Image (cartoon, helix red, strand yellow):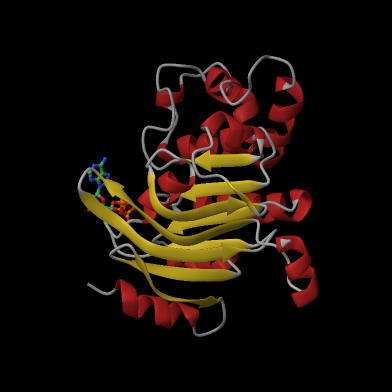
């Protein structure tokens, strides 16, 4: 029915849509009646000051934070209450901001954890080397001994192991030097080009976010404060929202 209506209207079904989503922690409401839609193959930047609820949006999509009301849909089907294992099987990848790696495990073991078994490891990791060739030489190194930038590339590499169709990325550029940010931007654009990946990035780095995104929104106290398609005036407009 939904597909029929959309076909009639000549629109594409969003890859991911949030409708009036509310969530929070214990008695505290963080996200309030948030709605957004991301088209297939689109890169969407969710921005906002610290503590505005950006990470909570990602965690709510993934079911780590319970949905209180509203609906979240992947390819038009509700994913409210769906397990993380099912989401991964449906092609959802996640690059978290914090505690993403097992510091005492090797690079190889951290990458291997993206898969259920060793089967497919060689093929999956080859794709990751395509983006981040240095990992090939570092497989036996402990993840905790990689530099900050290398760890971020490992986090993203792991999220790409299963060739996700929807990738959620939380502040990947935080604290990184421009050359590493550039490598990550190139990897994301290439992944979208070759795999049609839809990407939702949570970011505070405007040049990086707006350099790769098609659309954007600014989150303020759990609500969308402003949004649009990326154009020439976007950076100045978003900057106004991020001023302290
Ligand atoms: N586990 C938790 N329990 C209680 N409150 C939390 C929890 N995690 C986050 N919060 C609160 O929820 C609010 C939104 O946090 P969130 O991490 O989503 O914001 P953010 O926009 O991603 O911020 P940042 O840019 O600093 O990462 C903050 O006030 C934070 O203190």
Image quadrant of residue 99?
A: top left
Image spot of residue 123 (x, y percent)? 76, 26
Query: Closest to the observer: 231 or 152?
Result: 231
User: In the image, is residue 222 above or below residue 161?
Assistant: below
* Relative horizontal placement of residue 53, taking residue 159 as reference (left or right): left
* Relative horizontal placement of residue 66, taking residue 209 as reference (left or right): left
What residue do we see at 44% from left, 28% from top? 101
What residue do we see at 67% from left, 52% from top? 75
Query: Closest to the observer: 156 or 50?
Result: 50
What residue do we see at 50% from left, 17% from top? 106
Residue lying furthest front: 1
Marker count (numbered): 0
Residue lying furthest bottom: 233
Question: Where's the N terminus, which quadrant?
Answer: bottom right
Query: Closest to the observer: 59 or 164?
Result: 59
Residue 182 visible at all: no
Image spot of residue 149 (x, y percent)? 46, 41
Image spot of residue 182 (x, y percent)? 56, 55
Residue 144 visible at all: yes
User: In the image, is residue 220 above or below residue 118?
Assistant: below
Question: Where's the C terminus, which quadrant?
Answer: bottom left
What residue do we see at 58% from left, 52% from top? 73
Image quadrant of residue 66?
A: top left
Image spot of residue 177 (x, y percent)? 43, 52
């Amino acid at each position: 029915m939904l597909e029929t209506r959309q076909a009639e209207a000549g629109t594409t079904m969003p890859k991911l849509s949030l409708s009036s989503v509310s969530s929070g922690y214990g008695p505290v409401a963080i996200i309030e009646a948030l709605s957004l839609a991301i088209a297939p193959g689109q890169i969407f930047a969710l921005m906002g000051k610290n503590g505005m609820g950006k990470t909570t949006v990602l965690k709510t999509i993934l079911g780590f934070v319970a949905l209180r009301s509203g609906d979240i849909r992947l390819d038009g089907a509700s994913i409210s209450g769906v397990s993380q294992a099912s989401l991964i099987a449906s092609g959802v990848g996640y690059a978290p901001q914090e505690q993403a790696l097992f510091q005492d495990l090797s690079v190889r073991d951290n990458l291997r954890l993206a898969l259920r078994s060793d089967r497919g490891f060689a093929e999956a990791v080859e794709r990751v080397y395509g983006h981040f060739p240095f990992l090939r030489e570092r497989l036996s190194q402990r993840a905790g001994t990689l530099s900050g930038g290398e760890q971020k590339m490992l986090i993203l590499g792991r999220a790409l192991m299963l060739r996700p169709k929807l990738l959620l990325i939380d502040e990947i550029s935080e604290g990184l030097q421009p050359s590493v940010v550039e490598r990550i931007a190139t990897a994301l654009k290439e992944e979208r080009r070759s795999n049609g990946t839809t990407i939702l990035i949570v970011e505070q780095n405007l040049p990086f976010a707006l350099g790769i995104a098609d659309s954007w929104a600014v989150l303020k106290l759990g609500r969308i404060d402003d949004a649009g398609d990326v154009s020439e005036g976007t950076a100045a407009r978003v900057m106004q929202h991020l001023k302290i």
